[in-house]
Every structure is written in C-alpha cells, then in structure tokens.
Amino acid sequence: MKLLIVKTTSMGDVVHALPALCDLLRALPEAEVDWLVESPFAAIPRLHPGVRRVIPIAWRKWRHRLADRATWRAMAVLRRTLRREPYDLVLDLQGLLKSAMWARQAIGPVAGYDAASAREPLAAWLYRRTAAVPRELHAIERCRRLAAAHLGYTLPTTAPEFGLQVPPAEWKAPARYAALIPNASRVDKLWPESRWVAVGRRLRAKGWTPVVMWGSEAEQTLAERIAAGCDGAVPTFLTVEQVAALLARAQAVVGLDTGFTHLAAAYGRPTVGIYCDHEPGLAGVTGPGPAASIGGKGQVPKLADVIALLESQHGPLPPG
C-alpha cells in the first residue's frame, strides 16, 4: 500500500501527526508512506524511518506571490512530483482548504475529516472519503483516530509514540544542560524576560548549563541577554535537524508554545510548555517522558508555578 500523508504546517502540528504514522505502520508494516510538508519543517518527517519520501511545499511563500511566473512554475513542479505515481490513499490530517487542495493534486482517493470535524468545514467537500472525529480531542488523538478510521485498523489504546531518530550532534553542547526556548512567532506568546533569567539561574544551580535557543537576529539578541543573566550558553544558528539533536539530549526543556517545545517532548525529554495566549488543552505538550503545560488565554504563568512544575519533574532546584 502506498500512502501520502498531508500535514504541512506548523511544526507543532507536524510533530502531533507522528503518532498516527507510528500506528499505521504497526498495523500495515508493508505500507510505503510519503509526506507533504512545508519546507521549513521537512526535517521532522525525515527523522522518522517510516517515511519513504518527504515532499516539500512552499505554499506559505507562494500564496503571497501568486502574480509571479516563478511561483506558478514551482507549483507545477510540485504537482508533477505529487503525480509521479498513484497512491492507494491520500490522507489529509490537516483539515484545511489549502491542504485539501494540494491533496487533490496527487493521484489517488483523498480522505479526511467530515465537515463537522474539519478545522475548515469546506475542506470536506474536496475529499472522496470522510470520517467523524470529535473536535474537542487533543490534536494527536484526532490524527490517530482519523488514520485508523480511513485505513481500517483498530485504534491503539497505547500511549502515542513518535518514532523520531536522534540525529548526530553538530554543535558542541555543555556536558549537562537544559534548553530554554523563550522566543515565539508572536509577541503575545512571550513570557517576561526576567522570569527566563530566574529559571535559568535555578537550572544553573542544579549543575545544568542553560542553553538559550534562537532562530532570528532579534531572537538571538534576547537569547544573549537571558544567557548573560544566568551564566548560560547561546548556540550558533542551528537548522531544525541540529536543534532536534540538541533537544533530544537535554536534561530538561522549558519553552513557549512553539514547535521546538513539542519536538522536545516527542523525544521524551522532561518538558514544561508555557502558554500565554491560548489554552493548551487541544495542543498541550505531550510525549513519552514527563511533560506539562501551564498557562492559558490571558493567564501568564507565575514564575513560582513554573519552578514548581520543574521540581515535580527533577526534584528540588537550589536557589539561583
């Protein structure tokens, strides 16, 4: 059986789709699985040994340049790639019009959520097959249920597995370290800088070097200030795969609601996710190791509460 998974964005959503892949490969071990994903996140499915081919898409860029001939040429190339061979099933785990539209470019029956279950109900009109999945479930559970419904196997009752390989470490990290992820794509997701410094000091007092992550010039400036305040370290610019290598070896991870925080939890690292702009319920930090989410819409977590969660995972943290 040849399958195409469509789960293009964002990084956290791509991570949340991995347990569905693990489930279907256990039920259908001979399945050959390709994955359509936005280029910046392509490293995630590439780290799963069950993915035969990763097909990058640049829709986030193309949608702003639809008047350019180069955009249409690039989309034509992607369409030819998607139609290189037929699929027995094209499974859209995203449930959006954009994902359904690109799923339809492949050769094969397209399956997804029904109109009551999809994030954008109109997407259901583009599917040949639909299935009902309660919207109030965690994103991981929704993906697992949708895949089981369309591929005809019994939904596992076991905890979700992510199946990610750990890539080689390229940045020389300290011997023992904790990763801090204080940057996010939106200002309303941010947590006060002084609290990051305080967390870093407590982790440093435990004997772990705080390694502060960043991805842009502005984020690097913030990371350097936080690291200076807690005797931490700031890595060079790292690719997604290199960040995965670092997170997978951390003693602890504290991060905002970002894809990298969810990736750390997927590797089973003790992880605390800080939510400042929305409820974590449907997309809370989840993984095979200790994982906790704190905060919510208009509920900026207190420093003491974050420290308490860290201590529940690691034991007492000496004063910083």
Image: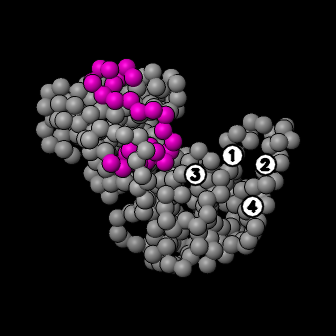
- Secondary element type, mark 4: helix
Q: Name the residue under label 1.
A: 58
Can residue 314 be seen from the camera position used here?
Answer: yes
- Mark toward the start of the polypeptide (3 vs 1): 3
Q: Say what amino acid the circle numbered 4 marks.
A: Thr
Give coordinates of residue 22: x percent, y percent.
Answer: 46, 68
- Mark toward the start of the polypeptide (2 vs 4): 2
Give coordinates of residue 258: x percent, y percent.
Answer: 45, 40
Q: Name the residue under label 2.
A: 74
Question: Is 103 displayed left or right of 173 in the figure?
Answer: right
CA distance separating discs 2 and 3: 17 Å
Residue at x 78%, y 48% (from the top left corner)? 74
Bounds of the magenta segment: 224-249
Q: Name the residue under label 4.
A: 81
Can residue 137 be seen from the camera position used here?
Answer: no
- Secondary element type, mark 2: helix
Q: Quadrant of the N terminus?
A: bottom right
Q: Residues within 10 Å of mark 1 (few under 14, many from 20)?
A: some
Residue at x 74%, y 61% (from the top left corner)? 81
Residue contact at pointers 3 and 1, CB within 8 angstroms: no
CA distance separating discs 2 and 4: 11 Å
Q: How many labels does the image show?
A: 4
Q: Name the residue under label 3.
A: 42
Give coordinates of residue 234: x percent, y percent.
Answer: 38, 29
Of residues 136 and 193, the one nearer the viewer is 193
